[in-house]
Amino acid sequence: MSGIVGIVATHNTVPGLLQSLQQMEEPGHNSCGLVVHGLQGQTNSPARLHRHRRVQRASAWMAQMAQSGKPELNGLQGLIGMGHSGQTPSMASQALPHVLPCMSHGPNAHLNSPARVAVVLHGPLQGSDALREALLERDYGFKSNSVAEMLAHLIDATYQSDPAQAVYRVLELLQGPLAMGVMFNAHPKKMFVAQRGKPLYWGSGPAHTAWASTPAALPKNTSDLNPLCAGQVLEILSSESGISHQLHA
């Protein structure tokens, strides 16, 4: 059983995401990760999607960071981010590419291509070999046989100008129950959430809106919890006036 969480806030979301990863950790979990749109350390580079993954339990990862005495994740800062805690089938050297979040760098990507789409996924989603072959023909590269990676590529391939519509279209292409969160590098202040047959809960706090597959993973001061209805897409936006949301039916 895996867990996913997302936070959009008026402050840095990284500490909250790390705390949420520990809160939704369960026996059997052996991997975790997060993705944030923002800045990594002291750099003049523009904000972009930054991902950190580990083939270890979230609590062990946090303990290592605390012992290192260094800033969390080299000073990663961002107002919007998602995380995942779960079980990776293999602990071998090839396990890391299967750890979520998964990202798509687009077709014909090279080593320095920035990520365009990031995805966290919960549920036994089913993807077809035909869809994978179609993506390969469009020059999307795969680093694993993960359905989540295929999902990220599908969303990127489907996206035109409306990110919510891209999420809807991909839901129609895949079978099986799922809950997912999606971030687009082209929409740095927005996050999209959807579910079909897997529960998701969302609510707001004084300076954030958050969602998760279990209420226990939400920040402590999150209130007015709502279940996300199947087939809906929740769009969360961070702006100078605060955090807002929109439900696409």
Image: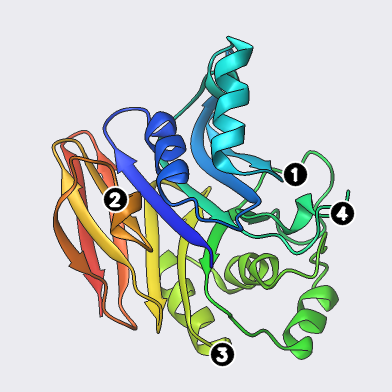
Compare residues 64 and 176 and report the one nearer the observer. 64
Residue farthest along the right direction in this orientation: 93
* Mark 3 surroundings: few (<14), some (14-19) or many (≥20) residues within 10 A: some
Sequence-first tag of 2 and 3: 3
Quadrant for residue 14, please give it: top left
* C-alpha separation, residue under disc 2 versus residue under disc 3: 26 Å
Residue 175: which disc?
Answer: 3
Cβ atoms at labels 1 and 2 below 8 Å apart: no
Sequence-first tag of 3 and 1: 1
Please report the residue visible at 31 percent of the width from the left and 53 percent of the height from the top: 216
Compare residues 141 and 95 and report the one nearer the observer. 95
Q: Which residue position is annotated with label 4?
A: 94
Residue 113: which disc?
Answer: 1
Give the label, 3 or 1, closer to the camera.
3
Give the label, 1 or 4, closer to the camera.
4
Kindly identify the amino acid type of the residue bearing the numbered disc 1. Answer: Ser
* C-alpha separation, residue under disc 3 versus residue under disc 1: 30 Å
Report helix, strand or loop for mark 2: strand
* Mark 4 surroundings: few (<14), some (14-19) or many (≥20) residues within 10 A: few
Q: Which residue position is annotated with label 2?
A: 210
Kindly identify the amino acid type of the residue bearing the numbered disc 3. Answer: Gln
Cβ atoms at labels 1 and 4 below 8 Å apart: no
What is the x, y in percent for residue 249?
25, 80
Cβ atoms at labels 4 and 3 below 8 Å apart: no
Quadrant for residue 143, please give it: bottom right
* C-alpha separation, residue under disc 1 versus residue under disc 4: 22 Å
